[in-house]
Image: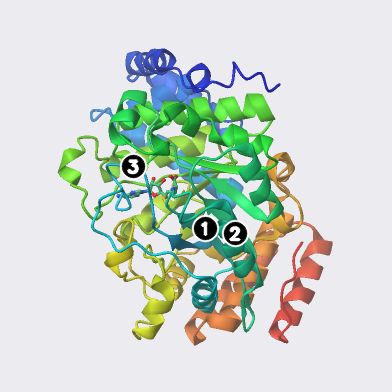
Amino acid sequence: MFDSKSNLAENFISHDEIIKVLDFGKDHMNDTEMVKKILKKAESLSGLDRYEVSVLLHACENKDNQALREGIFAMARKIKERIYGKRIVMFAPLYVSNYCINGCKYCGYHTGSGICRKKLTQQEVAEECRAIEAMGHKRIALEAGEDPKNCDIDYIIECMKTAYSTKNGNGEIRRINVNIAAADEDIYRKLKEAGIGTYILFQETYHKPTYEKLHPSGPKSDYEYHTTAHDRAMRGGIDDVGIGVLYGLYEYKYEVIGTMLHVKHLEDTFGVGPHTISIPRVKMAEDVDLSLFPNIVTDEQFKTIIAVIRLAVPYTGMIISTREEQNFRDEIISLGISQTSGGSCTGVGGYAKRIKCGECDSGSDDQSTAQFKVSDVRSEAEVSKALLKNGYIPSFCTACYRAGRTGDRFMQLAKTGDISNCCLPNAMLTLAEYALDYGDDEFNRLTFDVIQKERENILDEKVRNKFDEYISLIKSGQRDFRF
Ligand code: SAM
């Protein structure tokens, strides 16, 4: 199973294969019958192969056939609705250190950039966590630059321990996803022991020459080591891994097909694909000139990427961040996004600083230590309220991870459709907690209206009755119920 030769990056991210798949898509982009057939297959929730994905990506570029594109988007919305319903999982990033020894051309952390270098003390990590908890978040993505001297694995583990043990009233961090540089198996084993949720690592670009050009120095310049990191993470015992491309570094269709090959490799090797796919776009950053990036993805192309990935891997979570601007975020969520951040700060120590500056939890950011500029600067409460008003259920659920439903056990739950009796009630229980602990009157009204309406969609009567009982207990001040 773990034949080291077959796990070489070039064996699963083959440039020649990607080009062959892209040529196939180009040749069939006007084949309306083929597109219809592919959409029919997507509707069965069985996912799509890379050739089908390529045809859809190309078909969406066909300006003469807008109906085709609209049909693809409509199917993405339908699938998103069928699998995720109205739920959207909320999280906040926590940047603990911006020390970095890499030379990544697009990142504000690169060596020699003018940012203030900072690493949080454990007391500061606790302050950040209290500030994040005061916004109502239960799930964080812990982020750090790569610097084995200033920010080694023991420091990251300390930060995780601090985060899990820091409470603020009813607030607590219940799941920590970690986004740190590619590492060896022993480090992943330590992260597993410390209670990691998902290990997230972005490929940035699957196109090797571009990767090598944009990562000229530091450990991250090793394409092979970076691309095989998720394999080591899974061998190190981490069940849930997250992948992603930084869109804008290379041609987007190439990247989507690269993503499909990566998904297939993880599925073939470990029996389960990535838990999440993040869809970040490159943003302005300190000492980074965006005009040097000729592959910046337009909003329309970005919508295509999200819709097509949703059809291809219907059960895989898809994440967007506050890199995306407010109105556009609401639009793309409907095409397939299942997780989003809110009230984010990409600076080190920025949450606590914001409170000290009297800026409440709004997403404006101190840029002196930030990795890149956020576009959606609303507070978490504003983001969640806007979602509620648009008919969504902001979810603060972390139940699967805490009940051990990770890796293939999670996929089993998703695929058997038991989501209506598990994920839906859990999302509403955590939303009720959030409303009562952090919401204003309008938020509470919107929350309990939505709960009243959506409880009908809990199909199992026993679960529905239990759900009603839990909601009463939450109203009486008790917390942390889950299915
Ligand atoms: N040090 C870790 C690594 O090497 O993967 C974590 C990196 S960083 C904390 C998280 C992600 O931010 C990176 O993987 C990159 O995709 C993204 N990022 C870096 N610069 C960016 C920019 N200018 N705009 C948007 N995202 C950026």
Marks 3 and 2, how far apart at CA: 28 Å
Location of residue 269 in the rendering, given as x and y in whole percent from the top left corner: 65, 25
Quadrant holding the C terminus: bottom right
For label 2, the SS is strand
**Can residue 284 be seen from the camera position used here?**
yes
Q: Nearer the viewer, mark 1 or mark 3?
A: 1
For mark 2, does the 10 Å Cα neighbourhood hold few (<14), some (14 to 19), or many (20 or more) residues?
many
Measure how far apart labels 1 and 2 are at the Cα level.
6 Å
The spot of residue 91 in percent (x, y) is 51, 62
The kind of residue on which mark 3 rests is: Phe
Q: Earlier in the sequence, mark 1 or mark 2?
A: 1
* In the depicted structure, whether residue 332 falls above or below residue 118: above
Q: Which residue is mark 3?
A: 302
Image location of residue 109, percent across then percent down = 33, 52
Which amino acid, mark 2? Ile
Identify residue type, mark 1: Ala
Residue 39 can be seen in this image: no
Residue 172 placement: quadrant: bottom right
Q: Residue furthest front?
A: 149
Residue 42 against residue 341 in the figure, above or below: above
Look at the numbered disc 1 and give the secondary structure of its residue: strand
Residue depicted at 38% across the width and 78% down the height: 353
Instruction: Residue under label 2, please give it.
Output: 176
The residue closer to the viewer here, 321 or 108, is: 108
Residue beneath disc 1: 141
> For the residue carrying disc 3, how many other residues have a C-alpha within 10 Å: few (<14), some (14-19), or many (20+)?
some
Which quarter of the rendering shows the N terminus?
Answer: top right
> What residue appears at the point 37 percent right and 39 percent down from the top-left corner?
218
